[in-house]
Image (spheres, rainbow, N blue to C red):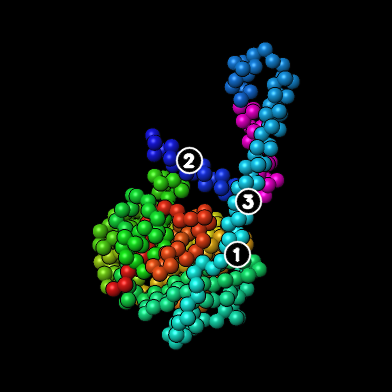
Amino acid sequence: MGDQINVFLDDLSALFWRLSQFPIAFQLLLWIASAGFTGLIFLFLFKKIFFRNSTEKTITLWWISFVLTGIPIVFAVILDARAELQKEEDQLLSSNIVPVVEVAKDSLYSTAVSFDNIQIGDLGAPVVKTIWAKPGIEVFQLNFQNPNAFVVLAIADLKTFSIELDTAVTKKELTSQFAKRFQCEIAVNGEAGTTPGDDCPLGQWTGNYVVKGAALKMEDSDKRPFMYFSKEGKGFYSTDRDIVKALTGDMYNAIWGRFDLILNGVEAIDTRDHSQEKPYPRTVIGIDQTGTKVFMLVADGRKPQHSRGLTMKECAAVLLPYGCYNAMACDQGGSSCMYVEKFGIVNRPADGGERRVYTHFGLRRN
């Protein structure tokens, strides 16, 4: 019972925090509508108990007074929440997430691509800055302006790294905690389930999950893609429409996603992804045509002064010039998070901090 209450409170807190980001007029209208609906139920169920001898006019006046008295309280709560959001936005504008490092320009992925003639939706061309580069990996920021969008993209050579997945798929954990436990140089979130609650079910958001040859979940459906890797570290991709219920020899590690993004080097967004046209915080994992390079993209969102987020089409437009051949969306929104060993969290999660999730995808140097 205690766990259920905690999950309910977590979900309620997340709901109210998201509502606080809507326009004030909308929130007040929502309050009046909710109070009015509650009033109808109240009158229907309790009229004979609490207002047995009252006239309809008296009851109506009592309820209008309740609604009007509540408006200043609700208004104060909204202003307080929005003041916290504004404070956070001001802090975001006054500081960098991580410093930009100077690295040799030869053999770096970022210098091989120019966005000068590439249009990313209505975002235009980004400013690309490398924040981390070592043999076999590069992590860089893409900053768009007017509107603002902030993206962190990592490209790694799978000959240099081992895939790390967590066997504790029934327990949520922060991405940073997972990465530190498995000594990952870099990690991103996988799946959080149906709600932000720590004990929420996976529901429809489940699929195939294999860790070091052990099949922990073989729950594929025609809605869930998955990426899998051989023992030698070569990557393969299974589309969301394919249904695979049997373990194969190449499935040494496997992690499911939510929807297709890129298939065989071409944008291939599943029409069933109802968030695809909305600027949103995103997490994407992909591989190149040879299966020897892995791509990890995290886009911030819900913070207009920092980043409004990316649509799925914009995610594909960012990844395709770098040679991403197959890619899938992972859990998104408040779950989107990237950890780099040198810096910690290198994006700004939508909820103001990391969210616990069931699965993670990490790389540990060989």
Give the residue type that dot 1 points to.
Leu
In the rendered view, tell whether residue 197 sits above or below residue 57: below
Whether residue 141 sits left or right of residue 161 in the image: it is: right
- The quadrant in which the N terminus is found is top left
Whether residue 83 sits left or right of residue 234 in the image: it is: right
In the rendered view, tell whether residue 190 sits above or below residue 56: below
Q: Looking at this view, is 94 or 338 the one in front?
A: 94
Counting from the top left corner in percent of width and height, residue 160 is at 32, 76
Q: State which mark lies toward you, 2 or 3.
A: 3
Q: Residues within 10 Å of mark 2 (few under 14, many from 20)?
A: few
Q: Looking at this view, is 105 or 42 the one in front?
A: 105
Q: CA distance from mark 3 to mark 1?
A: 15 Å
At horizontal 44% and vertical 45% (from top left) the residue drawn is 197
Q: Is residue 244 visible?
A: no
Q: Which residue is mark 2?
A: 9
The verdict on residue 28 being magenta is yes
Secondary element under disc 2, as helix, strand or loop, is helix
Q: Is residue 219 visible?
A: yes
Counting from the top left corner in percent of width and height, residue 299 is at 52, 64
The verdict on residue 285 being magenta is no
Q: CA distance from mark 2 to mark 1?
A: 31 Å
Counting from the top left corner in percent of width and height, residue 156 is at 39, 74
Q: Quadrant of residue 258?
A: bottom left
Q: Residues within 10 Å of mark 1 (few under 14, many from 20)?
A: few
Give the residue type that dot 2 points to.
Leu
Q: Earlier in the sequence, mark 2 or mark 1?
A: 2
Q: Magenta residues, as a range?
A: 22-41
At horizontal 48% and vertical 40% (from top left) the residue drawn is 9
Q: Earlier in the sequence, mark 2 or mark 3?
A: 2
Secondary element under disc 3, as helix, strand or loop, is helix
Q: Which mark is residue 93?
A: 1
